[in-house]
């Protein structure tokens, strides 16, 4: 189990580059560093949470497409701002909502939990294995030289972001491309993960109160996943 001071040190060092705030001054990232977790495969509780998220999404959408939701539309605009095509590159919230008709994925307890919170609160949310980080997390506009480890046709490959692309990274490379589109293989949550970093992303349509409510709900479902779960929280914003 990590020293709580280490969790605080990671979040104290985390930052968003000024160029990102110049692109979207309304952007906020709420970071949660959580320790003492017992991850494991999908279980009855995480499956039930995912099922509840599916039901909530169907009720919120009705016959409308995901981009009819204000926060999804805002993220589409943000993607266009740095040169991505949102019809081809879906932000993580929209990608999940588009999978609702056929059923959301069941991956493992931690991934199921943050995916469900993402859908229930209508915001992009990601999770990373914090023990696999090298240095602190930071959100930047890429030079294009950064490395991103992913897979293509089942084979591990190294890709590079487009210049100007918004990416999360650490000292070893990109941990998530296109703000919240695709995570690196290196820091993916695994069944054996005990210390995790969760990133909840918000743009203008979402208030700070709604953002914190989503984080509170995430912690409600993470605390039962270990006898001594501890968390540290930090909000990164332009002001």
Image (cartoon, rainbow, N blue to C red):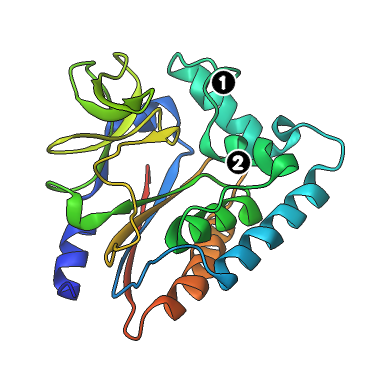
Which comes before the other along the chain, label 2 or label 1?
A: 1
* Residue extending farthest bottom: 227
Alpha carbon distance from label 2 to label 1: 14 Å
In this rendering, does residue 13 appear at all?
no
Tag nearer the camera, 2 or 1: 2
Please name the residue shown 58% across and 26% down the image: 76
Please name the residue shown 53% across and 56% down the image: 211
* Residue extending farthest front: 154
In the shown orientation, is residue 216 left or right of residue 151? Answer: right
Callout 1 environment at 10 Å: few (<14), some (14 to 19), or many (20+)? some
Q: Which residue is disc 1 drawn over?
A: 86
Towards the viewer: 83 or 22: 83
| Vertical comparison of 48 with 159: above or below | below
Q: Which residue is disc 2 drawn over?
A: 96
Query: Helix, strand, or loop for circle 2?
Result: helix
- Residue 47 locus on image (x, y percent): 60, 64
Please name the residue shown 52% across and 22% down the image: 89
In the shown orientation, is residue 140 left or right of residue 26? Answer: left
Towards the viewer: 4 or 210: 4
Please name the residue shown 24% across and 56% down the image: 130
* Residue extending farthest right: 63
Query: Helix, strand, or loop for circle 1?
Result: loop
| Vertical comparison of 53 with 159: above or below | below
Towards the viewer: 152 or 4: 152
């Amino acid at each position: 189990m990590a020293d709580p001071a280490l969790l605080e040190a990671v979040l104290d060092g985390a930052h968003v580059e000024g160029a990102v705030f110049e692109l979207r001054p309304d952007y906020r990232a709420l970071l949660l560093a959580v320790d003492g977790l017992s991850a494991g495969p999908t279980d009855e509780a995480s499956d039930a949470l995912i099922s509840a998220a599916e039901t909530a999404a169907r009720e919120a959408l009705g016959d409308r497409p995901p981009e009819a939701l204000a926060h999804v539309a805002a993220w589409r605009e943000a993607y266009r701002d740095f040169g991505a095509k949102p019809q081809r590159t879906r932000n993580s919230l929209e990608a999940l909502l588009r999978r609702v008709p056929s059923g959301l994925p069941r991956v493992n307890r931690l991934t199921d939990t943050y995916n469900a919170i993402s859908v229930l609160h209508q915001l992009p949310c990601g999770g990373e294995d914090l023990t696999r980080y090298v240095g602190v997390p930071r959100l930047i506009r890429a030079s294009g030289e950064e490395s991103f480890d992913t897979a293509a046709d089942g084979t591990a490959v190294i890709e590079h972001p487009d210049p100007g692309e918004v990416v999360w990274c650490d000292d070893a490379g990109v941990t998530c491309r296109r703000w919240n589109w695709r995570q690196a293989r290196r820091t993916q949550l695994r069944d054996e993960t005990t210390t995790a970093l969760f990133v909840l992303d918000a743009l203008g349509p979402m208030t700070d109160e709604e953002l914190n409510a989503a984080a509170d709900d995430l912690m409600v479902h993470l605390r039962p996943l270990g006898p001594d779960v501890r968390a540290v929280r930090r909000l990164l914003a332009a002001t």
